[in-house]
Image (cartoon, rainbow, N blue to C red):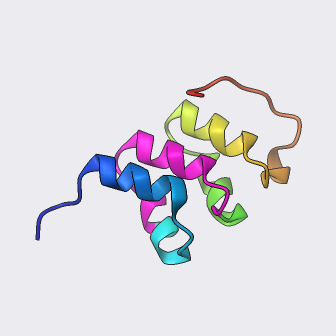
Amino acid sequence: MAEESVDLRKKRAKSSTLPEELEKLAEDKDELVRFYLAGNTNTPISLLEKLAQDEDEDVQLCSRKHKHACFAAGEAGGGRG
């Protein structure tokens, strides 16, 4: 089976509501997939906390700016968006 394209994974990361799919996307090798996941309003707090520790700074900042990210209240940042 061929690997799904990055564009399709980014699209799913932006809009998925399935917890198991969101968890899989949080492990994606592409930082833009993780970035879009961090901005998805359906991403649970447990994954936002994980993404706040991501190796990519923009992923970290986006997860901390998420509306459910009360664990990072008061943190500011830039990013892709």
Question: 4 left or right of 13?
Answer: left
Quadrant in the picture for the C terminus: top right
Question: 2 left or right of 23?
Answer: left
Question: 16 left or right of 45?
Answer: left
Query: Which percent across, then down, holds residue 58?
Result: 56, 32
Query: Which percent across, then down, holds residue 43?
Result: 63, 61
Q: Is residue 21 above or below residue 63?
A: below
Query: Going 12% across and 64% down the picture, which residue do you hit?
Result: 2
Query: Going 79% across and 55% down the picture, which residue do you hit?
Result: 68
Number of on-image labels: 0
Taking the view exactly as shown, the residue that stands out farthest to the top is 78
Taking the view exactly as shown, the residue that stands out farthest to the left is 1
Secondary structure mostly seen in magenta is helix
Query: Which percent across, then down, holds residue 49?
Result: 68, 55
Query: Going 51% across and 52% down the picture, which residue do you hit?
Result: 14
Question: 9 left or right of 18?
Answer: left
Quadrant in the picture for the N terminus: bottom left
Q: Quadrant of residue 45?
A: bottom right
Q: Quadrant of residue 48?
A: bottom right
Query: Which percent across, then down, holds residue 67?
Result: 79, 49
Q: Is residue 47 above or below residue 79?
A: below
Query: Going 32% across and 54% down the picture, which residue do you hit?
Result: 8
Nearest to the observer: residue 11 or residue 48: 11
Magenta residue span:
24-43
